[in-house]
Image: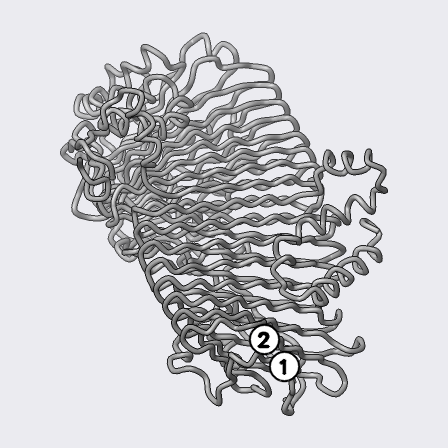
Amino acid sequence: MRSFEQKKTQVDDIDRSMYDFKDKVNASFEVKSGLTPEIVNQISVEKNDPEWMRLFRLKSLKIYNEMPLPSWGPPLDGLDIGHIVTYVRPNTEMRSKWSDVPDDIKNTFERLGIPQAERLSLAGVGAQYDSEVVYHNVRAEVAAQGVVYTDIESAMHGKYAEMVRKHFMKLVPPTDHKFAALHGAVWSGGSFVYVPPGVSVTIPLQSYFRLNAPGAGQFEHTLIIVDKGAYLHFIEGCSAPKYNVANLHAGCVELFVGENARMRYSTIENWSKNMYNLNTKRARVEKGGAIEWVSGSFGSNTSCLYPMSVLQGEGARAEFTGITFAGKGQNLDNGAKVLHLAPHTSSRVSTKSISKGGGCCTYRSSVVIAPQADHCKSSVSCESLMLDSESRSDTIPVMDIRNDEADVGHEAKIGRISDTAIFYLMSRGLSEDDARSIIVSGFAEPISRELPMEYAVEMNNLIKLEMSGSIG
Amino acid sequence: MNMTLKQVNALPVRTWNWLGVNGTPLEGDVPESFPRAEGKITLPDSVSSAAHPFEGAGIIRTGMGPEAERFVLKKKNAGYDLEAGPGVKAEGPVFIEYRLGPSCPALADCNTILARENSELTVVMQYASDGEGPVFHGGVTKILAEKNAVVHLIQVQLLNDSAVHFDDVGILTREGAFVEVIHAELGGSKAFAGCKARLEGRRSRLGTETIYLGENSRELDMNYVAEHIGRETESEMHANGALMDESQKIYRGTIDFQLGASRSVGHESEYTLLFSPNVRNRTAPLILCNEEDVEGQHAASIGKIDPHKLFYLMTRGLSEAEAKRIVIEAQFTPALEKIPSEELRQTVLEWLKERMDRNETIG
């Protein structure tokens, strides 16, 4: 009989070949590497910013220069902003037909399956290539409902200019942290979505972000306003080919969910393993509204990502469902933040993580219940699976409760595949391999079922688990 | 003089600064001089009081950290170095009682406990105060539990509402040893506690039971760390408490599975009852894991008394206040049952009853 102690579960690394192809860099314009007031001004001029935005960028740069690096979290030693090119404009304008997009860029998105997904299951698509959006389109019937889905630069100059100005980096101010300040200084690209009151967008919108240029940064800004009683499901995807130099992603997502509105924000993050993913996402939810985050984090060298839900209005609620898979050389520090600011608000956070091959997963979270937020409920659950002892898995949750009319629960589990569970399944006639496979699939299943079908399939492919025939 | 310790109870891994849990400064007025203080000690015959700390005590790290330890060493005016010889099963607990007040306003006690192979001893330390004047207590206790030794350390703090107090513990366990620490933090204006255990020996174990009571504007700050180094080590860390009035509390509990600690198990839990809209409760239960073959779990629950429990008790004829008292006492029972003295247990229960009676939301 084989010893239970000796054998280890073998889990394949994620197959990245479908993302790891490179286009020849064919930029029409790019700034020098580094970060100076001249570079920031240059980006502003190139993007034809309104004056308030130019000043905002410079103010953000000043904040960036004054702020220290975070004293917590994964090391950022390999990231030198002096070597990052913060703006790379692809050699095309934004198009609304794929046939008008240059072949090399179009082929990239074809290989990623974006136009096909648009045809099959999406109400609109935005595609960003390096620093600019190259394609944006929304179905006519959705547009006819008054839904606005466009690149943020167009919105800033058009009919929605005031709305953009009123909301831009108000939820995530540049003072929030050093990389929010960096974003404020050099942001480019991203999407603007407005869903009018009472409109339910029954099929999702999707933005896909592709970073092709080596040593570059991507700093897209996503601003979504879901008005009273409306519903939107927004999907964000991202990938990049692997280079030997560090790339940086410091995007910013600001979601404004109105009274009794509901929004689901799904992300499959699949950056290459040279990427520093220092992204900031935040939602403000008004009375009776709901935000649902679904997050799959598989790529990046280093990731710091903690979507925050600010429950501003009475009865608002937040759900966060996330999975993180860290393999060799990856340090993925992910989690969620919830701020209960109003009575009768509720939140539920559920996360899973798998670390293997020397990968490091950290679950980091905060739940804050403010003094005025009576009768709030919050429940947090996180589970981590370690597949070998080269890897690391840390759980760092904090709860800050300032109101006695609160009900807050937290539970966390860390460990290996249970011998008892394997034994039970084997006693039901399953082979050892099948038993283990079922357990690991079952571990990820609560998350994958929250994803749209095609993303669930993608995720299952990403976590393709091959068992070696023994228990770890 | 003003005591300023820049950071104590540091979280083993830092998180967002704005949460204020990465560590806490400890400030307070302490007397200029710390004249020799005498505790009342009851020492079983089989336990000896040594002249010096055991060898290696200095390198055992504590939960509150080096600043707190340095301060106590500098001001030391009391303390005992206890030793249970090989195979000694102490016939009764060691009782050490300090009373702080006008005649002894400041106490800095350094204690060591050495439990030799296969020995077993229980040490009970009680800190109480006479009168309501400001008093200070800072204590450090280092424990070395050799192979298969068993040590129970019970520290009960019943100081007055103006006291500044901290209790800091450092533990090292050899193979098969078991150390249990019971902390009852029930008084003071500032009550800090720390405990760090290095579970080095195979199959060694740590158990901590902490109870705390926040009232008035009491500031409670705690840091418990179990470092699993050896194989098949176990930790059980549990905390239960109640916060009233404008009290504040931070509880940090960390299970740290280090590489090589295979087949180790760590559990931690914290249950906090809240009785006032002005309290602030912060909880940071960490699990750090660098070893695959382990099992770690933590659970925390923070909120009001379950109304169904209250309702049930009230249908049995109890008043609301009585029902609340029973629920709170039940919360504290697992720790109180481990106090090996009926008299001290009753003192603690009386203390709790008195505090609950005078609190409007309970009594």
Name the kind of residue labelled 2 in the image. Answer: Val
In x, y percent, where is residue A43?
34, 43
Q: Is residue B50 above or below residue A11?
A: below
Q: Nearer the viewer, residue B252 or B35?
A: B35
In x, y percent, where is residue A349?
50, 35
Q: Which mark is residue B189?
A: none
Q: Which mark is residue B94?
A: 2
Q: Which residue is mark 1?
A: B41
Coloring applied to the structure: one colour
In x, y percent, where is residue A116?
27, 14
Residues at marks 1 and 2, CA–CA distance in whole angstroms: 7 Å
- Left/right of residue A291 with respect to residue A330 in the rendered view: right
> Which quadrant: the N terminus of chain A?
top left
Q: Secondary structure beneath disc 1? A: strand
In x, y percent, where is residue B116?
41, 74
- Whether residue A27 is visible, yes or no, is no
Name the kind of residue labelled 1 in the image. Answer: Ile
